[in-house]
Every structure is written in C-alpha cells, then in structure tokens.
Image: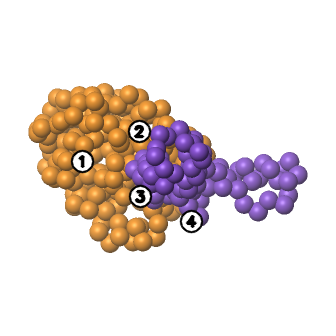
Amino acid sequence: MKTHVIIFPGSNCDRDVAVAIQNIIGSSPEMVWHKDSAINQSDLIVVPGGFSYGDYLRCGAMASTSPIMKSVIENANKGVPVMGICNGFQILIESGLLQGALIRNSSLSFICRDIIIKPTNTKTIFTNKSTISKMPIAHNEGNYFANSNQIKEIEDNDQIAFQYCDENGDINAHSNPNGSINNIAGVFNKSKNVLGMMPHPERAAESIHGCDDGRNIFESLLS
Amino acid sequence: MLAKIHITLKKDVLDPQGSVIANSLKSLGFDNINDVRQGKFIELEINSNSKEEAEKQCKDMCEKLLANLVIEDYSVEIEN
C-alpha cells in the first residue's frame, strides 16, 4: 500500500500517525510538505493533527489554501481514501471535502482526555473493523456543527462515522465532551472515501499507549 | 481604499464566548444586557478603481476564505 502523510507548519501528529501506519498497515508513508503540489498515486492520504498556521483566522482555514490541498482534493474526488484527524479534520472541512463546521468547545476549555466512540456506519473502508473504542481527544475547537438540513442530509446518507458514547455504548449528553450536535465525533463525505474525526486513533495504537483501540481504524483499511 | 469587514456567527450558532462575556458584563452591573455575540473585524487596504469593484472583491474573499459560511455571516464596508 502506498501511503502519504501531509505536513503543514504546525502539524504535530504527523510522526505519530506515520508510526501507526508503519506498524499496523506495514507501509512506510511518504511525508509530504504542504508546499509540494502533487501526490501522483496513493492508496491512503492522512492529514494529521496539530495547530497548522497557529490556528489563525479559523482552525484549518490557512492550511486549506496550501498548494498540496489541490492535489488532496483531486485524489479524494478520484476515490483515494483520505483521512483527517483532529486539525486534519478541521482542514478537510475548511477545504470543502467534508460538510459542517468545527467550532469552539461548548465548555470554552481545551480538552485533553480519553473518550469513547461508537462507529455509526461500519460498512466503510475506515470502519469495517470498528467497535466501541477508547482513544484520546485533544482540542479546543471540536464542537461539530451543521444546520438542521445538513444534519438530516448527513444522517440520511449514513455519513456519520463516529459518535461519542459511554462505556455501554449509550449516546447521551453526559458522554458528549465538547457540545457536538448529536454527539458527532467524525463524518464521511458522500462517497465514504474521506473521513474526518476529532479523536486520535494514532495515540491509542499500541499497548505502550495504555490502549490500542485505535488500531481498528487502520486495520479496517487493510481489508 | 479601506475595507472594513465584519464577520459574525449566524443567529442559529451557539456563541459560548458571547454568553460568558454577557455574564461578566452583568456581574459588573450592566444588567440591561440581553445578548452578546462575539465576532471578528478585519480591516484591509485595497487598490481598486471603484468602491463597487472593491466591495465585490472583498465579498469574494469572504466567501473563499475570510468567513465560513456554514457558521458565519459577513458584511463589507468600503471607505475612500
């Protein structure tokens, strides 16, 4: 499998996700600087977490105009799997590949802790091995928002990827860390080859992390 | 020309920062406040032949980058 990880100024999860890809998928990803303009052939492009451009204007807004994003969008439109984690999710939203918006956490606090998510649609390349999983979130703007028409459209097309839940898998207000509408933690594009998620599977990918539930997302991509 | 651009959260988007500001103002004794909405103000100098053209360009900038139309509204004012 040929894999790519994009690096923006301010990315800080690029190496973590590269290690997860290497260990789980068995592919050594090509690290692509944001000023490069082309990814010619890929089986997976990851837009990693971090604080690209210092979160100026809106999280992900500046990065979405980087030269490499044109190629990411072209590849996504051709059906190449593209995955955005945390700031990567914000960048994919700002670039128009995913619907909705990510706004300030309802608590107004930066949240860094383990949460539990439940896959909402397990029939995709990213989630076919997914189960209820524990992994960390670390964000200030992870509060997923879309207006009621957009939410209906996303639900009708099975585009919700993950929802925050409790240990029993119940999706309720108590298990919602940041105020996201309908506890949404991740969404797909319409054709399900683009995934954006706020939780960090790459930080829960081996036993040394204390939890390896995040592996199932990378394992799904293998099957 | 000078362009003054206001970007505000849409009415149906919760503004937690605005709510906290409202509470703080109330605790200072400004108890006649009903609602606070926080936004962004961007000022930019622009070379243009006419106010209309400058306004059109600024609107284009808002749609493409300065505002996120899912959650934000914008308004543009051009001064000579």
Residue behind mark 3: A100
- Is the residue A172 above or below the residue A25 in the image? below
Q: Residue at x 19, y 31 (%)?
A: A29
Structural distance between the alpha carbons of marks 3 and 2? 17 Å
Q: Secondary structure at mark 4?
A: loop
User: Which residue is more in the foreground, B58 or A43?
Assistant: B58
The answer as to whether the residues below labels 3 and 2 share one chain is yes
Tell me the crowding category of disc 2: few under 14, some 14 to 19, or many 20 or more residues within 10 angstroms, Cα based. Answer: many
Structural distance between the alpha carbons of marks 4 and 2? 25 Å
- The residue type indicated by label 1 comes to Ile
Structural distance between the alpha carbons of marks 3 and 4? 14 Å
Residue A73 got which mark?
Answer: 1
- Is the residue A42 above or below the residue A151 in the image? above
Chain bearing tag 3 is A
Asked if the residue at tag 2 contacts the one at tag 3, i.e. Cβ–Cβ closer than 8 Å, the answer is no
> Quick one: which residue is furthest to the front in this view?
B49
Residue behind mark 4: B12
Question: Comparing marks 1 and 3, which lies closer to the viewer?
Answer: 1
**Which color scheme does this rendered protein use?**
by chain
Residue behind mark 2: A62
Residue A50 got which mark?
Answer: none
Whole-percent x, y for residue B72 in the image:
52, 56
